[in-house]
Each structure stands twice: as structure tokens, then as C-alpha cells.
């Protein structure tokens, strides 16, 4: 097609035999063919131009690709290039109007076809370049999950993770080299672990079974306090649930958590959607380290942490869609800086437990409007040999949306 000089082609383990005639012609005509060593090997009978294996990092090949703008160039990818593949990365470099994509069957599609699973009922995740902890939020009883493996070690890592979190009875299907002559599908339990001879190219299909001691991460916000490592300075479960509701997270939004402490608000924000971003600002390095450990333990290692005092530490940060201030609202300058950073429609939520911080909230409410709410929680406690309800400190919450 006119103007579409960069062809992004999916190729499967069946090699050139599985390619459409149009894809074969594009490879044969290309002056440059970029791909992994495996991809280049599969397409070798058709390559007449210069083959370029992907360097590390992949971006190292972009100058060579862009230098041939207007000439026929092919990038080879596994299966569907826009399913956890190179397609999205290239779209940020080359306008989509200049590209042509011909996908092959994705590994996920092939796995569902082999197992008889409906794709719309299955969760998917990639562990290629991602911490295995990102799998944790998906561990729910009777759920089915497809996992793209980084290499032959991934099945063992995933089985060990499932055992540690109480899912040892889960079935782990190890699907290798799908769609090619070396295809193999085997099933084991997480407790038994994977076979020893797993091929590097593999995919895992999990049928999750929660044991009696399993700890699934609930979908509702306001996780139990014991899920978090903390030093007592943490937004407690009931108030946290109300705070997350007040923040109203939407997919793809960025949160500033100023004075993040244990990171509980930012972590639950990230759990709301995999596209969400959270930046925790914390003045104490020990608390920032604790927040990082909590984020990893709860499957959101993408939590970003900035150590420093607000408002100075806010300079240069990516702009927020929402801001929460829990432990950093003692300074009117912090509130002013947070309000100034928000876009129109952005939301500010501040929790206060001291009368000094309450005064800042009252001043903010007078200047910007919004809603002031007092939250009181009583928990059952022992009183000698009997029981009674002991009140926690009352929280005053200000929620304001910037016009």
C-alpha cells in the first residue's frame, strides 16, 4: 500500500509455510528484515535484504529502521505483533499510517484452541520483562490465566509462586512451541512443579485452585490491614476503602500519593486497573522501602517512589490526574502545589486527624469548595474480661474537583 513502507509481520513456529502470500512477498522485497534470531531463522528462505537481529535494548535497532524510511522494511514478530509484542513499541516511533501489520495467530489464541478455553473468560499476563509478582492479583480460586513465559525457567518460577501463596493444587499446562513441529502440551500440578525439559519458547495455562491457606487479593478496595507491612502510620482498612472511592480511579490515570507511608493507598490504586500509575512521595527512606516491599508483595511492583519533602519533591514529576495527601498535609504549600498540579477535572483528596491539618482543609474548602466528611470507626476490643467498642481517631476528609 502506498506510503506504508514498514511491514510488521507475525510469524509462527510453522515458519514461511504459515505465512499468507502477501506476507511472503513483503519479506522477499524488503531491503531490511528485523527480528529475533529465531524469527530470522524461520523466514530465512525468503530473506534477500539485510537481516538485522534485535539488539539489547530493542530500541538500538530503531535508527537502522528509520534510516530506510520510504524503502520496504519488514519487522518480524511472534504471532500477533500487537498482543504483548513489538507493534505497540513501533507505533510510538513510526506513524501507523506508514505501517502495515499482518498478524499471525497469537500464542493465546493457540493455547485456547488446544485447551478448549473461551478467550473472553481467560485473564492474560506477560512475564517477558515483568516481575513474576505481577501475577499475584490474578490468583483467584477457579480462575483461568494464560501466562507468556520469559524463557524455560518461567514454569518453575510460577509453580514456586503458586506454592508460596497457597495454590499448590492448581493445574499448570505447559504449552511449548505452539503451531510448529516441536509443539508439546503437558499438564502438571504447581505442587509437583514443571517437567525438567521445558523448551525456551513456552506458554503457561493456569487452572487455579486455592488451598485452605491461600491468600487471594480481593477485588474490593479496603484490603485487610494485615496485608501490609507498616509501622502503625497507615490509612486503616475502612477509611482506605472510603478514600479510594473518593479518589474514583479510572483506567490509565496517574495518582500522586503525598506522604505515602506504607503505600497502601497507592497500592490499592494500582490494583484498580493494570494501566494505572502511582507515584508515592515519602520523606523517610525507611518508609519508602517498606512501601516498595508492600507493592511487590501485593503484585504491583510498578509503584514509583520519590524520596523527599513536598512540595519541593513534586517538581518535575509527571502530572497527576488525582492527588491524595494523607501524611503530608501539615504544610499549606503542599496543598497549594497539589491543587496547582491538577488539570481541570482533577481530584484532590486529603485526610486529616489533627486540628492543625483540619484547619488547612477548612481553608481549602473555603477557597475551592468540594465536600468535607468526618469518618468515625469503632472496633471491638477487650475491656478487662469483657468486650467493648473502642473508637479510632476520627478522620476529616476533604474531596475537591478542580474546575
Image: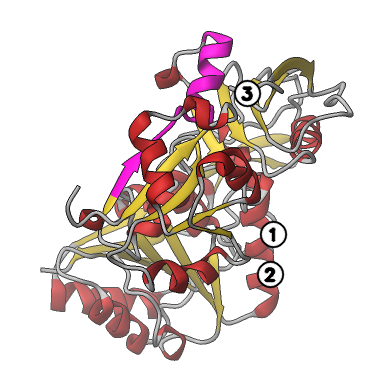
Which callout, 1 or 3, points at the residue further toward the start of the chain?
Answer: 3
Do callouts 1 and 2 mark residues in contact (Cβ within 8 Å)? yes
Instruction: Report x, y in % for residue 367.
Output: 14, 79
Residue lying at 38% horizontally and 49% vertically, measured from the top left: 29
Q: In the shown orientation, is residue 153 left or right of residue 106?
A: right
Instruction: Report x, y in % for residue 66.
Output: 37, 70
**In which image quadrant can residue 147 be found?**
top right
**Residue behind mark 3:** 180
Front one among 159 and 253:
159
**Residue behind mark 2:** 289
Of badges 1 and 3, the one in the foreground is: 3
Residue lying at 45% horizontally and 62% vertically, measured from the top left: 278
Q: Which residues are magenta?
A: 100-116
Residue lying at 19% horizontally and 57% vertically, measured from the top left: 3
**Residue behind mark 1:** 293
Label 3: element kind: loop
Packing grade of label 3 (10 A; few <14, some 14-19, many >=20) is: few
Rendered position, 27 above or below 63: above
Label 1: element kind: helix
Rendered position, 151 above or below 352: above
Q: In the shown orientation, is residue 26 left or right of residue 77?
A: left
> Distance from label 2 to label 3 (Cα)?
46 Å
Amino acid at each position: 500500500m502506498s506510503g506504508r513502507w514498514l511491514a510488521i509481520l507475525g510469524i509462527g513456529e510453522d515458519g514461511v509455510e504459515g505465512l499468507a502470500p502477501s506476507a511472503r512477498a513483503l519479506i522477499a522485497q524488503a531491503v531490511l528484515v528485523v527480528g529475533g534470531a529465531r524469527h530470522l531463522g524461520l523466514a530465512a528462505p525468503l530473506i534477500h535484504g539485510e537481516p538485522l537481529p534485535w539488539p539489547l535494548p530493542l530500541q538500538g535497532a530503531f535508527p537502522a529502521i528509520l534510516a530506510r524510511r520510504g524503502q520496504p522494511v519488514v519487522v518480524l514478530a511472534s504471532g500477533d505483533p500487537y498482543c504483548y509484542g513489538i507493534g505497540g513499541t513501533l507505533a510510538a516511533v513510526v506513524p501507523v499510517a506508514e505501517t502495515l501489520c499482518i498478524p499471525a495467530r497469537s500464542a493465546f489464541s493457540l493455547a485456547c484452541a488446544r485447551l478448549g478455553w473461551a478467550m473472553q473468560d481467560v485473564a492474560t499476563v506477560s512475564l517477558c520483562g515483568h516481575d513474576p509478582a505481577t501475577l499475584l492479583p490474578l490468583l483467584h480460586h477457579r480462575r483461568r490465566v494464560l501466562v507468556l513465559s520469559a524463557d524455560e525457567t518461567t514454569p518453575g518460577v510460577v509453580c514456586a509462586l503458586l506454592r508460596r501463596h497457597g495454590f499448590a493444587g492448581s493445574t499448570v499446562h505447559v504449552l511449548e512451541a505452539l503451531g510448529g513441529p516441536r509443539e508439546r502440551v503437558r499438564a502438571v500440578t504447581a505442587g509437583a512443579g514443571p517437567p525438567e525439559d521445558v523448551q525456551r519458547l513456552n506458554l503457561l495455562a493456569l487452572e487455579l485452585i486455592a488451598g485452605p491457606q491461600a491468600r487471594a487479593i480481593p477485588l474490593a478496595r479496603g484490603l485487610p490491614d494485615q496485608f501490609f507491612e507498616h509501622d502503625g502510620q497507615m490509612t486503616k482498612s475502612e477509611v482506605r476503602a472510603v478514600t479510594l472511592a473518593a479518589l474514583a480511579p479510572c483506567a490509565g490515570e496517574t495518582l500522586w500519593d503525598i506522604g505515602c507511608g506504607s503505600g497502601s493507598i497507592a497500592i490499592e490504586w494500582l490494583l484498580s486497573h493494570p494501566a494505572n500509575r502511582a507515584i508515592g512521595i515519602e520523606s523517610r527512606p525507611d518508609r519508602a522501602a517498606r512501601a516498595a516491599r508492600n507493592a511487590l508483595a501485593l503484585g504491583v511492583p510498578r509503584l514509583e517512589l520519590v524520596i523527599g519533602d513536598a512540595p519541593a519533591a513534586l517538581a518535575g514529576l509527571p502530572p497527576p490526574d488525582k492527588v491524595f495527601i494523607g501524611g503530608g498535609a501539615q504544610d499549606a504549600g503542599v496543598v497549594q502545589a497539589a491543587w496547582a498540579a491538577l488539570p481541570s477535572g482533577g481530584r484532590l483528596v486529603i485526610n486529616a486527624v489533627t486540628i492543625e491539618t483540619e484547619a488547612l482543609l477548612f481553608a481549602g474548602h473555603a477557597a475551592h469548595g468540594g465536600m468535607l466528611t468526618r469518618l468515625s470507626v469503632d472496633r471491638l476490643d477487650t475491656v478487662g474480661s469483657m468486650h467493648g467498642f473502642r473508637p479510632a481517631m476520627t478522620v476529616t476528609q476533604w474531596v475537591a474537583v478542580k474546575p
